Image (spheres, grey):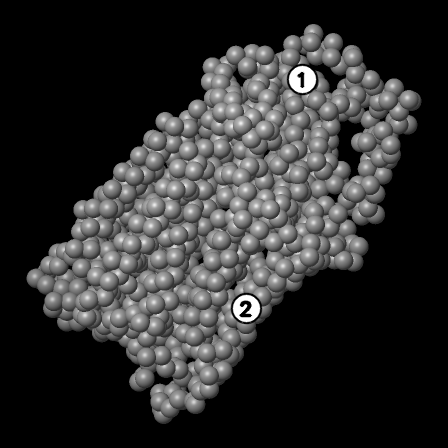
Amino acid sequence: MSANAQDHAEDHDDHGHHHKETFVTKYIFSQDHKMISKQYLITGLFMGIIGIAMSLLFRMQLAWPDKTFTIYEIFLGKWGADGVMDPSVYLALVTIHGTIMVFFVLTAGLSGTFSNLLIPLQIGARDMASGFLNMISYWLFFLSSVFMVLSLFVEAGPASAGWTIYPPLSALPQAIPGSGAGMTLWLVSMAIFIASSLLGALNYIVTVINLRTKGMSMTRLPLTIWAFFVTAIIGVVSFPVLLSAALMLIMDRSFGTSFFLSDIYIAGEVLHNQGGSPVLFEHLFWFLGHPEVYIVILPAMGLVSEIMATNSRKPIFGYRAMVASILAIAFLSTIVWGHHMFISGMNPFLGSVFTFTTLLIAIPSAVKSFNWITTLWKGNLQMNTGMLFSIGFVSTFITGGLTGIILGDSALDINVHDTYFVVAHFHLVMGVSALYGLFAGVYHWFPKMFEGRMLNKNLGFVHFWVTVIGAYGVFFPMHFIGMAGLPRRYYTNTNFPYFDDLADINVIITIFAIITAAGQLVFLYNFISSMFYGKKGPKNPWDSNTLEWTAEVKHIHGNWDGPIPEVHRWSYDYSKLNKDETDYVIEGQDYIPQHVPLQDNEEEMNH
Amino acid sequence: MTAFLVVLVIILFGVALMQLNKIFLMSKSKADETAQIASDKDNSINGYLMLGFAFFTYFLLIYCFWEWGNVLLPEAASEHGAGIDTLMYVSMALIFVVGFFTLWLLGWFAFKYRGKKGNRALFFADNDKLEFIWTIIPVIVLAGLIIYGLFTWTDIMNVDTEDDPMVVELYAYQFDWRARYSGPDNTLGEANVRLIEGVNQLGVDASDPNSQDDVVVNELHLPLGRKVLFKMRSQDVLHSAYMPHFRAQMNCVPGMITQFAFTPSITTTDMRFNDDVVGKVGRINKIRRDKSVELLAKGEEALEPYEFDYVLLCNKICGTNHYNMQMKIIVESQEDYDAWIAAQPTFAEVIKK
């Protein structure tokens, strides 16, 4: 396959001719990685709007459980009759919110967008190894999004067993209405999603291994590529396990098998199922589920490392340690899944093992955080919006990551498991952080996506500051209601007078959530208007070293009009001085792009 | 209060929109190619804001503790709970120190090194010593924390039969709980969902001699100072028996029996006189009184005043009424407990009727 692509690439070098493209091949069934990346981004943003809107609805219910809102009736129809939210639709909202945000926004929207955009451009390739598979991957993702959205309109309601879809609740329509057709569509959608994700991931891996330009050794790769590469590997290792879990669940639901069901008496009758174990499902689910959070966060880490180095005008501190910690996190991520199951009924000894491996992850995470902070030290920080979101990322990654030390400790997990403490923790460390990574990436690479057009910076600043203040306003107080013992996924807390004094906190959280969501409208406006009317900036607006800024501003198939640039150095030669330390290596220019050969007056580094 | 906040949000949102429009118009006037790239002025403003942001996180943390420190759970009402709480304090202290320190560096560096034309960044790509230090320190600290945590965990989860714990079954179904006491023989009779019939709601095997003295109730009474070994069962879907005041939780899984053991150390009556609880209940009742006034004005029933009780909640999503699946727990002296259990009919008596 790679040989074909190479031939194809040479073909370009020789003739530089371009195929005639129709509207359909250019904008819809495009095999060009840049267009596919935009398709991923826009689909992801669309799903994100649905996901965030859902969170607002259930946050309103939590803050004002005894009030009626016409808005429920508008959006939820029969489940919001007379402005009162139905308890089952509350569970459906939290379920679909989780599913959409984790898989459709933060997996496909983040990794799909930036892996597609940056892998070929930053390693110096004309396109992905297989443009056709890449196209299939996007359209499968689109199809799975369609199924997920369609499931919202099912008679008995969409899946509502939580995004973790633990059976038996998810297997038995008698247990909850959403486990009927809604759950079937959920499973179908996820099965297609997994196929899409695997096709994408295999393509990324092959491309990074085979299509690097001359001189681009693995140790010269920008950290973005390292992150996407390793993310793709984790995806290939863990997503098939979720598929197997989903298939077994489908069989339990439709064909009378008993993989996850045993000894059940429901709706007045005993089910025939015997010998299955719901704990088995939990193992299978979290064998993907935990790596999944790293599938979400690693690309964000890669984007942040790159943007932070560029805007600090400094090399990323400890490049090798950064790569090593990505690999360490990836490895550890596959052996910690049991920390979601300390109190699932599995053997307590297993709990001890998983506590051990889980807390080990703190080490590479700490190394990364310290290295980012050191990258800022003595820099010349250019506060572009991408940079602001990168700093915001480090902030939420630290605050959210630290509470992981509590949750990863099996003894402490007993009392905070499944409370709002967990909700606060994972929203900060993977939800908000990964979203900041996504925003940072969009602000930074928007000119690359939209032929030189730039996002408005002042709107960007407003968006950033509203978002960071608002997100902390939402998730900081949430730790406290969790430590007060409040379980998650409760439709209302009014049945427990003991929780009455938490009502005020819930109101404050919801108000912050509304403000933060309103702040995202600024981004949407900026995004859409800049897409068409944004001002064109210089070819390399952030004075960056990586190869994508040497590619043509106008999107052409094959990325570079002439030959692919050859790489002579790593991508972090920012502010490097010449041998006499009188000036930068290139006079008056504080960066040396990767394709610039080693200069006479420059000391050679290890890269 | 709420109405005021809503109005405030709407007003602030309006102001924000106006400001946005203004900013947008201002930003449009420049025709320069570099207009959308941060200028020295942007660097400076955002640098100051970053420093402010560090202070904001500290402020938020202090405010949360100041304002809501009193909503947290009172002291643990079980013997092992004290161990969990100590571990929690140690971990929290560590988190605060690390968080304070790192967030300060982040905010301070962002402010101190905000970009300016002509400034030169330091080319600083590697330092093995530094990296070694901040790899090894987390390793040591975490090793300590892991060992401490594992000892605590093992103590809690490994039930020593020499303690002669009282065996009680917690039985979960959509959407309520039952407790089954094992009676004088301290052995639960066999049970299976296939035996559920009529009054035998838990599917207890009536032919098992061990089941005859079992007692099924819907209120959990526990004697003070006696170790209780809970055997959890579920009839339909996953549930989780969460007893926050005892720092105890375990999932109830259909098809298997899970377990958790603890020793209650504070009676319900004593807990009602705990300072934290008195304060919390006082505030809750004030909220309820205020709300009752509103309700009465609307012609609805007033809320009953609240009295503290331990509670068992379901903490694993289990269906539409998940939010209201609870059982009262009462911890009392051995004499009170004995008197109470003696008054309950045994399983044999119940099915004979």
The answer to which image quadrant residue B350 occupies is: top right
Residue located at (87% from left, 19% from top): B349
Residue B198's x, y, as percent? 87, 32
Residue located at (69% from left, 57% from top): A155
| Chain holding disc 2 | A
Query: Which residue in the structure is indicated by mark 1?
Result: B222
Q: Is residue B144 left or right of residue A376?
A: right
| Chain holding disc 1 | B
Secondary structure beneath disc 2? Answer: helix
Of the two numbered discs 1 and 2 in the rendering, the one whose residue sits closer to the viewer? 2
Residue A475 makes an appearance in the image = no
Query: Which residue in the structure is indicated by mark 2?
Result: A142
Q: Residues within 10 Å of mark 1 (few under 14, many from 20)?
A: many
Amino acid found under the numbered disc labelled 1:
Leu
**The C terminus of chain A: image quadrant:** bottom left
Q: Is residue A581 above or below residue A282?
A: below
Answer yes or no: do the residues labelled 1 and 2 have beta carbons within 8 Å? no
Q: Nearer the viewer, residue A259 or B294?
A: B294
Amino acid found under the numbered disc labelled 2:
Phe
Secondary structure beneath disc 1? Answer: strand
Q: Residues within 10 Å of mark 2 (few under 14, many from 20)?
A: many
Q: Is residue B146 above or below residue B279?
A: below
